[in-house]
Image (spheres, rainbow, N blue to C red):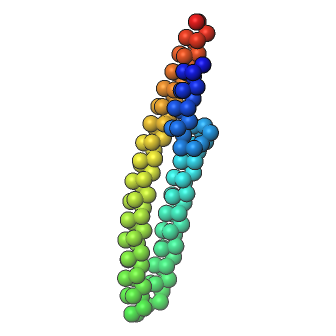
Amino acid sequence: GRVLEGIGKSISYDLDGEESYSTYLRRESAQISDAYSSSDRSLSELEGKFRQGQEQGGREEARLGDSFLGLLLHARALLRETRHISSGLRDKHDLLALTVRSHGARLSRLKNDYLRA
């Protein structure tokens, strides 16, 4: 009983405050989705601003183009960072999936050993 309680506590520390692995993984997935949605929205806004800048013409067009270029470069940097973070989260998700399977196998083995004893 103490062994199972210890395993339960160990698993709960790995969940970052969540009640289950599925809840934890859902939260991580939601954060990735939010990051991608924000990036897509930002790019759409930047494209719209770029089109507006082209239509105004003259010096104003040049200023807006420069401003847009700065925003585009910033957005591209944000997208790279988002992609890097999402890659890390995907790796973390894969690691968590392996951990869940491992814990499941360990718990099953402990249960079978307990039932045999």
Query: Residue 17 vs residue 39: left or right?
Result: right
Residue at the bottom extreme?
A: 59
Q: How many marks?
A: 0
Residue at screen point 42% across, 53% down: 85
Front residue (pair 101, 103)? 103
Q: Percent x, y for residue 87?
A: 42, 48
Residue at screen point 37% across, 82% down: 66
Residue at screen point 46% across, 47% down: 89
Q: Percent x, y for residue 101?
A: 51, 27
Q: Is residue 109 visible?
A: yes
Residue at screen point 58% across, 25% down: 5
Front residue (pair 110, 71)? 110
Residue at the top extreme?
A: 117
Front residue (pair 4, 50)? 4
The quarter in which the C terminus is drawn is top right
Query: Residue 113 vs residue 66: left or right?
Result: right
Query: Residue 97 vs residue 78: left or right?
Result: right
